[in-house]
Amino acid sequence: MEHFDVLILGSGLAGQSVALKLADQRKVALVTKRALMESASAYAQGGIAAVLDDADSIEAHVRDTLVAGAGLCDPKAVRFVVERGKKAIDWLIAQGVPFSRDEHGQYHLTREGGHSQRRIIHAADATGAAVQQTLSEKVKAHPNIEVFEHHIAIDLITGAKIGRPELGCLGAYIFDRQAGHVRTFSAGHTVLATGGAGKVYLYSTNPDTATGDGIAMAWRAGCRVANLEFIQFHPTCLYHPHAKSFLISEAVRGEGGILRLPNGERFMPKHDPRAELAPRDIVARAIDYEMKRLGIECVYLDITHKDADWIRSHFPNIYARCLELGIDITRQPIPVVPAAHYTCGGVKVDLASCTDLPHLYAVGESTCTGLHGANRLASNSLLECLVFGEAAVQDILAQPSRPALPLPAWDESRVTDADEEVVIAHNWDELRRFMWDYVGIVRTTKRLQRAMHRIRLLEREIAEYYANFRVSNDLIELRNLVTVAELIVRCALRRKESRGLHYTKDYPETLPVARDTILRPRRPASGAPVRQSPTV
């Protein structure tokens, strides 16, 4: 058993920022499924939204977030995040993040869909990578942070495991992918920063690591989850057989990009007066509608009316990647399709990032904080990681360190090596395909019921497999994905309206009162009383 003051699961912006802010006073373990840089944060292109210009205001950013959230945002959570935006950006600048500057030497701010002002600070069109690279170097250099690459958490260890449910979360069982065995990590506090669940869908902009691990683990440990029916489909993922998961940034539309049909016709103005700058849910549904109406495989995003040198300087990575595939975006429109992009719901937390399980925190895309409501406003996600990460840090530092307790080791005495790994591959493929077909951009009750029927069959098959064979990375991820798929469908079936990212043909109208969809496990977290969020 290994003991740390704080165990952080996930190495994106949420996990790394929490680790760095704790490390001067606490011994930290940072566990990541692949290499330190491999996270959804590193894939973020557009930037980080914050009020940084005199022409902008806190009230405007709050208002834009509430409008995009379609009535379901928690106003307290929104204001909590927006008011702390500049401080969060200042911290990144102090770490050395190389944000882009304009010709006057000021930080360049761009605009994205749903924003009324230019407030997106960015590092060209690879903001996430720039942030991750900067923080990763500091994480690796800090003597109080021990990084465990190629490790994946299996389950949280709760006090109930040793007959002390009041102790809350005590750590986690971690599978060492390279050594092939399970390690026991004891921790005074545990932070879930595991990201979203985009890989539950066949087409996604997310890295392969986005398998909903933290959401599934927290649910199994007894924590509430909320609003998982709201899966954001990014409107513009590059459509090309050799361009797996490559995102075409929101900023391309923010800087004047026009969506066109194959015949060159512009179509967004007939769907929304904001046209290409409408929020993502509206743009994604419009593209989906036009593709189905015309039977076409993609639409086109056209930025060719801009100066070629300007395009290359503002979108160097997009330009280079498209050029590799034979598309010169200075002269040709970009073929795009919607793809699963962001999980707006997740583990319910309060303004201190506390879950229902004592000493368990959750930060970032794995959470439901109340910020995003029914649809995340572009570039608010990285800001949420920073602000709620800081909140978790302050709550942890306000508490005394907890001593290590003896925890039961992982028991493999009654399992054997798997005889047919092909079962996992088949189940993974089946799950992602029917989730795309039945629980996608446009839904019906019948489609959701069909999905749930197939999920139940898969759950039984995966549970039997998990009970009889030694764990593997693929089995752990598949087990988590099918759990999150069930939670998504359960939430979707409960919402008898269309709101934000959840659109159902059976209930096309929006109800006058917005309510969260909150799922409660059969048992509260480790038998402890549920800690009600002050933002509910």
Image (cartoon, rainbow, N blue to C red):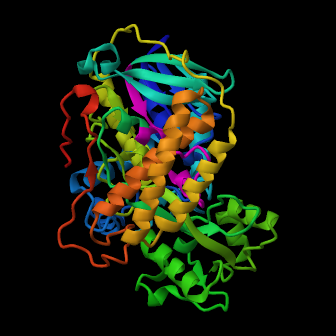
Q: Nearer the viewer, residue 354 or 423?
A: 423
Q: Residue at x 57, y 22 (%)?
A: 415
Residue 21 vertical placement versus 235 (above, below): above
Magenta-span inclusion, residue 151: no
Q: Nearer the viewer, residue 80 or 293?
A: 293
Q: Residue at x 28, y 61 (%)?
A: 494
Q: Nearer the viewer, residue 69 or 277?
A: 69
Among the 4 quarters of the image, the one containing residue 478? top right
Where residue 317 appears, as percent x and y from the top left, is 70, 59
Where residue 527 appears, as percent x and y from the top left, is 23, 27
Q: Residue at x 21, y 60 (%)?
A: 515
Q: Residue at x 36, y 66 (%)?
A: 55
Report if residue 101 is visible in the image: no
Q: Please indicate whether residue 529 sits to the left or right of residue 526 in the image.
A: left
Which segment did they paint magenta? Answer: 188-216
Where residue 54 appears, as percent x and y from the top left, is 36, 62
Among the 4 quarters of the image, the one containing residue 524? top left
Report if residue 229 is visible in the image: yes
